[in-house]
């Protein structure tokens, strides 16, 4: 049930954006055990000047292809699991849509189920496992 926000500069084709989203999701399926159909992603495209980033921070250089992937999870993951996700996401995005690993930044925020309502105004932590499957 992670929620993913992907921020990029404007100008990417719909095919590029779909490949970006697909590769991010597939890495989460593989490393975070997210069910394949459990997909909630938003892609935000920004005008030049609306997305400001250090092009050389932590082993850049970053290009105009820079993508910031912010993942909000409903449960914490172990550091090893997160490290595997970062590596797999870089691999998948390099293969499709061709994003350089230097252009990928990922931020994971762990949360508690009390911070989620999947539908009908119900707090997720109060739902049974069966109800969560239907959300």
Image (cartoon, rainbow, N blue to C red):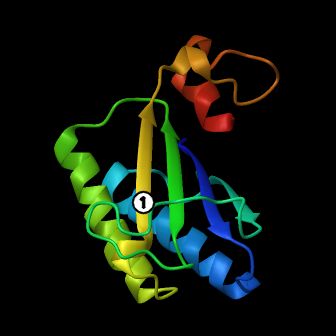
Residue 77 spot, x, y in % from top left = 30, 37
Residue at (57%, 78%) from the top-left corner? 64
Q: Farthest right residue?
A: 120
Q: Farthest top residue?
A: 126
Residue 60 spot, x, y in % from top left = 33, 72
Residue at (49%, 73%) from the top-left corner? 23
- Above or below residue 42? Residue 92 is below
Residue 30 spot, x, y in % from top left = 35, 62
- Whether residue 113 sits left or right of residue 9 in the image: it is left
State the count of labels.
1
- Whether residue 7 sits left or right of residue 76 in the image: it is right
Query: Which residue matches tag 1?
Result: 105
The C terminus is located in which quarter?
top right
The N terminus is located in which quarter?
top right
- Above or below residue 2? Residue 27 is below
- Whether residue 58 sits left or right of residue 61 in the image: it is left
Residue at (37%, 67%) from the top-left corner? 89
Residue at (69%, 24%) from the top-left corner? 117
Q: Helix, strand or loop at disc 1?
A: strand
- Whether residue 113 sits left or right of residue 92 in the image: it is right
Closest to the observer: 47 or 23?
A: 47
Closest to the observer: 46 or 123?
A: 46
Mark 1 Cα-neighbour bin, 10 Å: few <14, some 14–19, many ≥20:
some
Residue 5 spot, x, y in % from top left = 62, 52
């Amino acid at each position: 049930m992670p929620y993913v926000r992907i921020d990029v500069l404007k100008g990417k084709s719909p095919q590029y954006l779909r490949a970006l989203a697909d590769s991010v999701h597939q890495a989460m399926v593989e490393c975070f055990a997210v069910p394949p159909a459990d997909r909630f992603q938003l892609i935000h495209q920004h005008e030049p000047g609306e997305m400001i980033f250090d092009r050389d921070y932590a082993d850049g250089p970053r290009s105009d292809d820079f993508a910031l992937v912010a993942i909000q999870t409903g449960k914490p993951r172990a550091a090893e699991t997160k490290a595997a996700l970062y590596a797999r996401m870089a691999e998948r995005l390099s293969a499709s849509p061709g994003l350089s690993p230097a252009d990928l930044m990922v931020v994971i925020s762990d949360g508690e189920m009390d911070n989620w309502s999947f539908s009908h105004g119900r707090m997720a932590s109060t739902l049974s496992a069966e109800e969560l499957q239907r959300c």
